[in-house]
Image: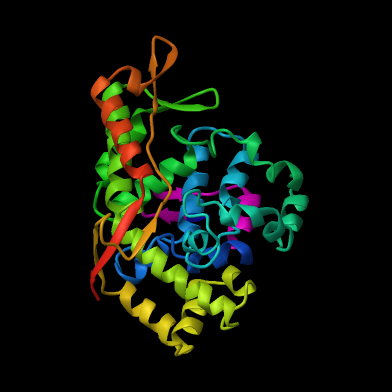
Amino acid sequence: MKYTDRIFGETTITEPVIQEIMASEAMQRLKRVNQYGASFYRFSHLTTNRFEHCVGVYLLLRKFNATVEEQIAGLLHDVPHTAFSHVIDFVFGGSQVGTFHEEFHKEVVINSEIPAILEKHGFSLEHLLDKHRFHLLERDLPDMCMDRVDYTFRDLVTDNLLTLDEVNEMLGDMIRVEDNLAFEHKEMALKFAYKYREGDERLWGHPLQAALYHLFAEAIKIALFENIITFKDLFSVDEVVYDKLAESKHPKIVKNLEMVQSIKVKEDPTDYDFFIKTKVRVINPYVLVEDKLVRVSQLDDEFKISNEAYREKRRKGFYIKIINS
């Protein structure tokens, strides 16, 4: 099967189990779940969907010779993502961790056609659902992992913060050391880390994005409370839920959806409309130095100081003032 990825180009996928999972209804649903949640309704160029990201993670795992089992786990890792992606974390009070969808991973996978596909090809569902077994796929910050590498490249290219040439340059310097990702050269590790921080500062953790997510989440909370949408609807697709919100004609819901499309904000701890904390993203990659893995912060004091300063700044959260709508 030929597959063309907007970041990694054209590739051939030969594993029957991968082909069948990609064609499954559970995976195809992810094509209608935007990776950027509320931000897409403000910035129309942010079009990446969860399907693209999952396949991208799979492609990276394959490139770095992960087992087929871990490649499958990478392909499936976002199957339970809700409509509007991480907006739902804000609905249920998890804006600082962003893991609401993970609580439903087992349930969503089991209630799909995926267990039958895995059984057909001799893979253990129980093993695949144990994410702690797959260290290339996911790790806690500040480590690199394939999930983090893919969304970094994908999101920053989509938002014109990174070029495909830069992606290829950094990817070409990455190496696998047992179950760790590292860089061969300090300069490339620093470039990735600084770009990752720029992604947080200008995209994932920007005050405007926090405001958009907050307003969208408040609309969803009202809709859930007043039975305009159901909890089950959250596991459908973006346009289904959005249409129900927009067609509700509920004044507060409609107002919030309109504000998402137009507001400007500023940070003001003395005069603000709401305070919110979001997930803090900073990364501290390994560099292979004389056959040993060394954090890049140990090799560059300026990076160490600036990374910690940024982390502390972000931990304080946002005092957001809406200045127009």
Q: Residue at x 64, y 36 (%)?
A: 132
Q: Which residues are magenta?
A: 3-24
Apparent side of residue 207 relative to residue 149 in the rendered image (left or right): left
55 magenta-colored: no
- Residue 123 lies, with reference to residue 135, above or below; the image says below
Apparent side of residue 155 relative to residue 249 in the rendered image (left or right): left
Apparent side of residue 226 relative to residue 219 in the rendered image (left or right): right
Q: Residue 185: where, in percent of width, then height?
A: 31, 21
Apparent side of residue 296 relative to residue 22 in the rendered image (left or right): left
18 magenta-colored: yes
Residues 58 and 214: in front is 214
Q: Residue 319: where, in percent of width, then height?
A: 31, 56
Residues 62 and 100: in front is 100
Q: Residue 158: where, in percent of width, then height?
A: 31, 56
Q: Is residue 122 visible?
A: no
Q: Is residue 260 visible?
A: yes
Name the quarter where the C terminus is drawn: bottom left
Question: How many labels sit on residues?
Answer: 0
- Residue 136 lies, with reference to residue 293, above or below; the image says below
Residues 12 and 55: in front is 55
Q: Residue farthest to the front?
A: 270
Q: Residue at x 60, y 59 (%)?
A: 80
Q: How is this picture coloured? A: rainbow
Q: Residue at x 31, y 32 (%)?
A: 307
Q: Residue 77: where, in percent of width, then height?
A: 58, 50
Q: Quadrant of residue 116?
A: bottom right
